[in-house]
Image: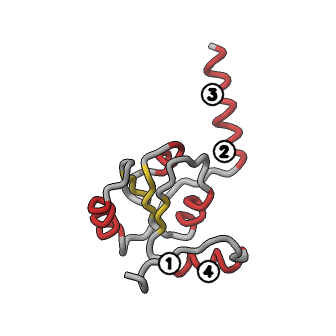
Amino acid sequence: MKNRVSFYGGGLSREEILQKYGDAGLFVLLSKHESYAISVAEALASGIPCIVAKTSALTEWVDDKNCFGINYPIDIDELVALINHTVGKTADGTKLFDWDDITEELMKTYRSDEQ
């Protein structure tokens, strides 16, 4: 298992981070609290499938095609099964929002509240 899973702390350059995404077969983020989770967006943009905890804003990424969710608290057997299911897949067709998209969605939200 040690040669198949890697944990990286801080201190990686941007170039090293992008290379890690390119080398990865799967990205897993099991945080209890996240807002946008740019690391999930970066992994998906790199074509890397993801597994995330079904908590906070991470649930917005779950589409069961490119990004798979797991309930919290994490059950190790369920996580292993989900990893086995996900390894070998490629993330494809994920809609990643740019700031124009986000601004437009925010404006729609505020306009719908006015009516």
Q: Earlier in the sequence, mark 2 or mark 4?
A: 4
Q: What amino acid type should be assigned to the residue bearing mark 3?
A: Thr
Q: What amino acid type should be assigned to the residue bearing mark 2?
A: Asp
Q: What amino acid type should be assigned to the residue bearing mark 4?
A: Gln
Residue named by callout 4: 19
Residue named by callout 1: 6
Residue named by callout 2: 101
| For residue 86, above or below residue 111 | below
Taking depth in this image into account, of 20 and 108 the one nearest to the observer is: 20
Taking depth in this image into account, of 93 and 9 the one nearest to the observer is: 9
Residue 107 pos. (x, y %): 69, 31
Disc 2 versus disc 4: distance between alpha carbons?
27 Å
Which numbered mark, 1 or 4, is in the foreground of this view?
1
Disc 1 versus disc 4: distance between alpha carbons?
14 Å
Q: What amino acid type should be assigned to the residue bearing mark 1?
A: Ser
Which numbered mark, 3 or 4, is in the foreground of this view?
4
Left or right: residue 40 compared with residue 17: left
Q: Which mark is residue 109?
A: 3
Which numbered mark, 3 or 1, is in the foreground of this view?
1
Q: Quadrant of the N terminus?
A: bottom left
Circle 4 packing at 10 Å, graded few (<14), some (14-19), many (20+), is: few
Q: Earlier in the sequence, mark 3 or mark 2?
A: 2
